Amino acid sequence: MFIHPVRFFRDIQLGIKNLMLHKLRSLLTMLGLVFGVGSVIAMLAVGEGASAEALNQIRKLGSRNIIVSAQKPSEEQSSANTRIRISIYGLLYDDVQRIAETIPTVNRIVPVKSIQNTGRMGKRTLDMRIVGTNSAWFDLVDRPVIAGRVISPRDEFDKSNVAVLTEHGTRRLMATESVVGESIRIGANYYEIIGVVRSEGATEGSMQTPDQQTDAYIPLSTAREHYGDLFSQMKSGTFIRELVELHQLIIEVDKEENVEATAEAVERMLEIFHKKKDYNVSVPLALLRQAEATKRTFNIVLGSIAGISLLVGGIGIMNIMLASVTERTREIGIRRAIGAKQRQIVAQFLIETVVLSFSGGLIGIGLGLLIPWIITQVVKMPTVVSLYSLTLSLGISVSVGIIFGIYPAMRAARLDPIEALRHE
Amino acid sequence: MPQSNSSQYAVRFEDIYKIYRMGTTEVRALDGVSANFSKGSFWAIMGPSGSGKSTMLNLLGCLDRPTSGKYFLDDQDVSTLNDDDLSDIRLKYLGFIFQSFNLIPQLTVEENIALPLYYLGWPNQQREARARELAALVGLEDRLRHRPAELSGGQQQRVAIARALSNDPVFLLADEPTGNLDTATSIEIIELLKKLNHEGKTIIMVTHEPDIARHATSQLFMRDGKIQKITHGLPDTPGATSA
């Protein structure tokens, strides 16, 4: 019987004892593995942390959504005589209907008209983005409603003067949440505040969430009536005039697997009706996939580095075990003379190696937990230590012990007992 | 497997040859040896170096196999067993005592004594009990937790004897058991062996010291791989019996 329960436990105890006899040597032997395991866990934690934040951000955009944004064509931007011209670009009211009627995989379309203006409540003022949209916005850009209600189809139909504010904007204006029922003046118009939603708005990389920190959502019909499609503003001495019907379309697709095909169809349809490329189609799902692919590549690179460091660690362990076998030749001879079988000698040395590599793995895990914690404390970078990276590295440590321990153990077992006993 | 008391002989050698080939030359370490060692006897194997003493010891200890001939250990033929089976024979039926004690330095006295029992798979408690009992037998019951390096040579050899007894072997095989000890301690050890022999233990001892061999009940003289003569009891003056 290769593994005898009593002997197995005793062999582990004996292994620990033998390693404790040479504390410094054991520690130095483990060091390669310790740093290998530690750095792998730390790097994975940093990578996971960064990508988890990115993935979370992308998920907030909705994985079944396609976001079409108005984009000022490049020749318009570089044109020298913007002073006298009106920039006409962006998405059209007709686009909404065309897409809805011709692409069957499209579930819903949320049109967005956004205008920068100043909101006032009492003495406080705040630069806000007025978002003219419909009730479906609140389904597609799913944010918790903190107080009151959101825009209803009835509000759209009635062209009501109602507004939903964001939590962030509300705090800046009122510092309390009991704003529902109050009125806010935006530009020249008064709106009744009917609700407050939480905003997730933030810019992450190249991707912008549909909502921003200080939004005021009003019915699209109301926005059209109050502000029209022409937007004028004095900006650093230049008079900017833009004619934009819609700034954004959020398109919800029926199924996730149809998202990419639908995005292509939308793009082709817009190409027909827009002479200039004054729009940009972005697919959160594609970004998600891209982010995941990047993460995979990152993991492969990390895996290779880890492999090399573990190989080096393993060779270090093998080297020391071979030295240990030579050093303990006489002990092996004694054990064989007493009646230990070859495979029991193999087991003894193999267990000792595995104890060594397992301890190295454990210390490495300690290091791998400490480094990300320090990174988070010092650089304020998010890190995520996943359970799988811990179990994986411990498993690999044990495997390294077995792989690099088997040769020294076999060598020990194959010694001739008579020769071994004579060894000085 | 040998059954206890199945034979009057602990060991029977039948026409044993051990031949080493070194290139073209042939070295006959054992050249047709036949001998019977009865149970309860105390043998001393003597002879000059190169006489085949060590080869005899290795064969007796089941550490090696003869080139030809038969070796019956308690009536079981062990001359053709493989490495694993020989290990088993050593574990169950043999007890070794070496010139240089050969204790394992990192183990305590108790653990050294119980080492064969560990390979026999005895549970912890029984092992400890047996180790205590044997330590008391050799007079070291107060040294159980010590390491070999903390003991004198004589004490270390007592530990080795206790270890050799732990599996209740068919015979004890001692290789120059007093070679590393001073005269007074040598006598202590030989007295301990004699006491064990009186209690019924079969002992085969290899030595080149006639003073020590004299204590055995029988002596076997080797020369050039052959048995030169066998005596039963040596007179007090060494060398006086050669005939």
Image (tube, rainbow, N blue to C red):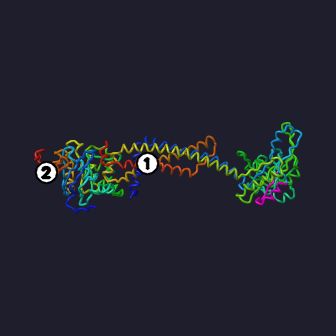
Query: What residue did someone put label 2 on?
Result: B233
Q: Kindly identify the amino acid type of the residue bearing the numbered disc 2.
A: Gly
Viewer-proximal residue, A282 or B121? A282
The verdict on a common chain for dots 2 and 1 is: no
Q: Quadrant of the N terminus of chain A?
A: bottom left
Q: Quadrant of the C terminus of chain A?
A: top left
Q: Is residue B51 magenta?
A: no
Q: Position of residue B243 (x, y in %)?
A: 10, 47
Gap between marks 2 and 1, in whole Å?
53 Å
How dense is the environment of label 1, judged by Cα within 10 Å: few (below 14), some, or many (20 and up)? many
The chain holding disc 1 is A
Residue depicted at 58% across the width and 42% down the height: A374
The chain holding disc 2 is B
Q: Kindly identify the amino acid type of the residue bearing the numbered disc 1.
A: Gly
Q: Position of residue A39 (x, y in %)?
A: 55, 44
Q: Are marks 2 and 1 in contact (CB under 8 Å)?
A: no
Tell me which segment is drawn in magenta. A94-112
Foreground disc of the pair 2, 1 = 1
Q: Position of residue A349 (x, y in %)?
A: 40, 49
Please state if B140 lies on the left or on the right of A344 as rendered: left
Query: What residue did someone put label 1 on?
Result: A405
Viewer-proximal residue, B241 or A241? B241
Question: The residue tagged with tag 1: helix, strand or loop?
Answer: helix
Residue depicted at 71% across the width and 51% down the height: A284
Q: Position of residue A316 (x, y in %)?
A: 46, 42
| Residue B136 visible here | no
